[in-house]
Image (cartoon, helix red, strand yellow):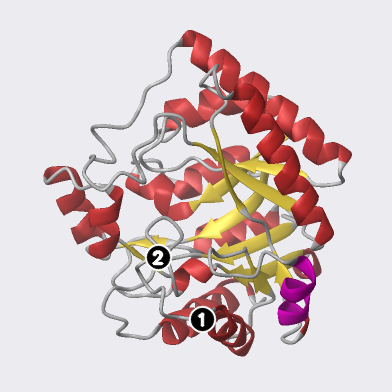
Amino acid sequence: MAASIRIGIQPTCWTNDDFQEIGDETPYQTILRETAAAGYEGGSTGHNYPSHIPSLRSALDAHSLSITSTWVGTQFSDPDKHGATLEYVRGQIQFLKRIGATDIVVAELAGAVNQMRGKSMFDDRPRLNEPQWFLLARGLNEAGKLANEAGMKLSFHPHLGTSVQNEDEIDRLLTETNPELVHLCLDTAHQYCADVNPFKLTSRYVKRISHVHLKNARQNVLDDAKKKKYSFFQSILGGIFTVPGDPEGGIDFHPILTELVKNEYSGWIVVEAEQSPDKTPTPFEYATMARKLIRDCINI
């Protein structure tokens, strides 16, 4: 079982793709070097990584690293953007296939507020009507079919500030999409912050999970975010996210990881946490902290 699990870490532990000024002074060469030094096998693409595939391959090969996936924001629930979204996904699948990745991770961003600095990620996020749910499910099935034909898996990421965030919305999306084509990206912190128990979600959908973002959350910052109606940007600056193993985090990862291994999960488990604003501890120290937690929990 252990041989089928690969452990990665996102470049967002050093930088931030939504708000690129956070950690943007960190070159991708540093991220790749520290990713390998901390004991990881790879990570997703970052906004400052080379888009030229031979250059990217050379940089990865220098550290024996792989690309886990890339971040793809869809807008299937917007009827005016449905077709363009499908073509965008097709292009991302082709890119990922050329660099040897097997996963594409998507989140529905039509109407989303996670990239809007002045909108509450809880109060101002979109809610889908019936036609929009139909369009979203149809688009994800179409995109999942494209991924499947390319020998890849499409995983849907429920994300704070979007239309698929809480438990009812996750359940509905997974019910209305084809389980052979649309899988679940478990993101422990996004689920935890949306009052979805990440262990219970893991247990219920363990056979549907094909990609894991292992991410921690600080309860005191989460409480402030809800009370003071923080945006996603304000929450990140406040330090809402951290890595597994950080004693300030509120998520117990041992039962989640144990449940995945017990059910013979096969795929990437990827540590994720937005850049620490004060860089104390450093991103490398956080990466090492998280890697130790995974080894302690499941000996991988």
> What amino acid type is highlighted by mark number 1?
Pro
Q: Which mark is residue 27?
A: 1
- Judged from the image, the secondary structure of the residue bearing numbered disc 1 is loop
Q: Earlier in the sequence, mark 1 or mark 2?
A: 1
Residue 268 position in % (x across, y down): 68, 61
Residue name at image x 67 percent, y 57 percent: 69
Residue 260 position in % (x across, y down): 64, 55
> What amino acid type is highlighted by mark number 2?
Glu
Residue name at image x 35 percent, y 67 percent: 21
Mark 2, other Cα within 10 Å: few <14 / some 14–19 / many ≥20: many
Residue name at image x 51 percent, y 21 percent: 78
Q: Is residue 102 visible?
A: no
- Judged from the image, the secondary structure of the residue bearing numbered disc 2 is loop
Q: Is residue 36 visible?
A: yes
Residue name at image x 38 percent, y 74 percent: 23
Residue denoted by label 2: 274
